[in-house]
Image: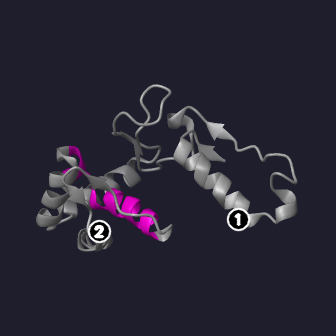
């Protein structure tokens, strides 16, 4: 089961590939079907409190939106947590200098999650024309997200 995003479908497929023995995965076995739910608002696995979405129309990407999930209390607690983050202005400014104001305004956990998943897979940190995210900048967001 997956939300209807390319990235989550790829994560589900990679998880299954690692979980299943070689005899139960392609090409020795037929492809595994992953159930997706195109209606984000009806997807119980996505956003109990706040649900962030980068889907515009039927396409991935194109903007970031946030909506209240199914549980109003979880949503208010998530908003309170986001409002409580302090500090990190230097890190936010550095990120904004690399990727613009939209990146600067992102919650620290969003940035930390994206950077952590890259490091887990041995992939390089993101770059722009102005430079790349340094290890120190990535660590700043990880610490902000954990506080």
Which disc, if any, is residue 18? 1
Relative to 56, does residue 145 appear above or below in the rendering? Answer: below
**Residue 144: quadrant of the picture:** bottom left
Q: Main secondary structure of the magenta part?
A: helix
Q: Nearer the viewer, residue 73 or 56?
A: 56
Tell me where the magenta segment starts and ends, as one range: 102-119
The answer to which of marks 2 and 1 sits earlier in the sequence is 1
Residue 15 image position (x, y, % from top left): 66, 60
What's the residue at 65%, 57% (across, down)? 14
Instruction: Tell me how the rendering is colored.
Output: one colour
Where is residue 38? Give x, y as percent. Answer: 58, 32
Q: Position of residue 139 (x, y in %)?
A: 29, 73
* The C terminus, quarter of image: bottom left
Q: Is residue 114 visible?
A: yes
Residue 116 against residue 5 in the figure, above or below: below
Q: Residue at x 43, y 69 (%)?
A: 119
Q: Secondary structure at mark 1?
A: helix
Determine the CA span between mark 2 and mark 1.
Answer: 28 Å
**Magenta-colored stretch includes residue 22:** no
Which mark is drawn over residue 138? 2
Left or right side of 5 for 33: right
Residue 37's place in the image compared with 131, above or below, is above
* Secondary structure of residue under mark 2: helix
């Amino acid at each position: 089961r997956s939300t209807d995003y390319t990235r989550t479908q790829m994560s589900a497929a990679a998880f299954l590939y690692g979980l299943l023995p070689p005899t139960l995965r392609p090409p020795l076995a037929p492809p595994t079907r992953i159930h997706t739910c195109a209606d984000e608002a009806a997807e119980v696995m996505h956003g109990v409190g706040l649900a962030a979405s980068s889907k515009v129309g039927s396409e991935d990407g194109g903007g970031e939106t946030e909506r209240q999930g199914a549980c109003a209390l979880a949503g208010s607690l998530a908003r309170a947590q986001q409002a409580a983050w302090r500090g990190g202005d230097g890190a936010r400014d550095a990120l904004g200098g690399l990727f613009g104001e939209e990146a600067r305004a992102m919650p620290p956990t969003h940035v930390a999650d994206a950077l952590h998943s890259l490091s887990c897979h041995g992939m390089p940190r993101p770059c722009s024309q102005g430079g790349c995210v340094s290890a120190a900048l990535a660590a700043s967001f990880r610490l902000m997200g954990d506080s």
